Amino acid sequence: MFKIDQRSSTPIYQQLVQEIKEAILKGILQPGDKLPSVRELSVQLTINPNTIQKSYQELERQKVIETLRGKGTFVSLNYKPSVDKEKLTVLKENLRNILVEAHYLGMKHGEILQLVTRLLEELNIKEGQN
Amino acid sequence: MIRVEHLTKTFGEYPALDNIDFEVQPGSVFGLVGPNGAGKTTLIKTIMGILLPDRGRVLIDGHDVHRNPGIKARVGYVADDQGFYPHFKVRDMIKFYRNTYVNWDEKRFQELWHLFPLPEGKRVRHLSKGMRTRLAVLLNLSIAPAVLVLDEPTSGLDPVLRRQLLNILVDEVAHRQTTILISTHNLNELERICDRIGIIHNGRVLFNESLEEMKQNVRKIQVAVNEPLPEEFLKQANILKVERRGRVYTIVVRENPGGVMAELERYRPLLLETIDMSLEDIFIYRMGGMGYGLEQTIAQ
């Protein structure tokens, strides 16, 4: 259920942290759900158990999951997913690419700003609101 | 845990192992890679106490392998050429292990036999290479080893069996905290299962790093600029390799990629991005940076 790309520059343990958070964000894993044990997950993904342990520790530190002694690891009941930094970076990167393209299409600074303002109006996103 | 101290071994004039030091922490997986003839098998055979070192020593759980060979009862060894008696039948080989190893775990053996069934009545010499490896893995896991040493265990296995073997190894670490030393040519399979990796070349262990450190530090950056980048910028010590095609530069950075990216921003790049690198790429570049012409030898 989790996808690991060993060729990525992102360390495997961080990928797993992301994957688990994403599963929670999408509702595939819900608060109170039990996560597979380190052993189960390491065999399922063919990944070193120490790496899985590290991901779980990181998620625990971020209070995304909690371990109950002798019972297992669960998604925290009071975990609220928030926009995370990495996604914001990707978004910024995408926006940047769009702006580069707009520039090459001959759009002027003012035109781009106007377009953004109009789109925000269309989407009914007002100042001071999120 | 395995601890190798100042291990040196020469064959005649030829230095096979040149003052090697490293440690494999309990419950961790150490991957040993290197081209043919680098000294992998010599190192493994010395660790196993089969070869005597000229200098240095090998400690397994604190016991010197060459002085206390008894410790080998707790070390599983899957050799490149398994030392099975060729005329033995599979069932005789099993009996041999069962009677030799004091820690033989019949329950574990039955579990594994179920996963890896083999023709009991066949003679070892009639088994294929892959089957002999399976038999060796089966027997060596059944002795409940504290340390497991595997010399290219995946060569000769088909993809399904290879995956199954790696799964058994990770389960062994997860379940029994076995310490594993594994040598291989296939860097990509190591990426998933190893804690640390050492590369052996000309009888020396050149790098001994965690995969994370390696992946975080070595990055490939692609940058396109209108004005050529100044020579002195490209001559920085942490830049391993620069390739230029027109406006586009490909720069491989050994450490602090963030800093280099920030500096590149100042040259008003048309494009600036990092490209993912596989472990294999990383090794090739790092070895290249050390002045070893390994491009042809590790890349497969």
Image (tube, coloured by chain):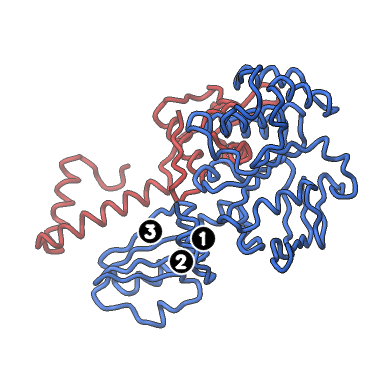
Q: Colour of chain A?
A: red
Q: Quadrant of residue B78?
A: top right
Please tell me whether residue A68 is drawn above or below residue B279 in the rendered image. Answer: above
Residue B82 x %, y %: 68, 37
Determine whether B198 is above or below B93 in the image. below
Q: Secondary structure at mark 1?
A: helix
Give amino acid for label 1: Asn
Q: Are marks 1 and 2 in contact (CB under 8 Å)?
A: yes
Circle 3 Cα neighbour tier, 10 Å, few/some/many (<14 / 14–19 / ≥20): some
Q: Residue at x 46, y 68 (%)?
A: B259
Horizontal and vertical percent position of residue A61: 60, 41
Q: Are marks 3 and 1 in contact (CB under 8 Å)?
A: no
Q: Nearer the viewer, residue B70 or A70?
A: B70
Q: Residues within 10 Å of mark 2 (few under 14, many from 20)?
A: many
Q: Which dot marks residue B217?
A: 1
The label number, if any, that marks residue B274 in the structure image: 3
Q: What residue do we see at 77% from left, 36% from top?
A: B146
Give the residue at x 85% y 27%.
B102
Question: Mark 3 falls on what kind of element?
Answer: strand
The chain letter under disc 1 is B
Disc 2 designates what residue?
B253
Q: Nearer the viewer, residue B264 or A127?
A: B264
Q: Quadrant location of the N terminus of chain B?
A: top right
Question: Tag 3, which chain?
Answer: B
Chain B colour in the picture = blue
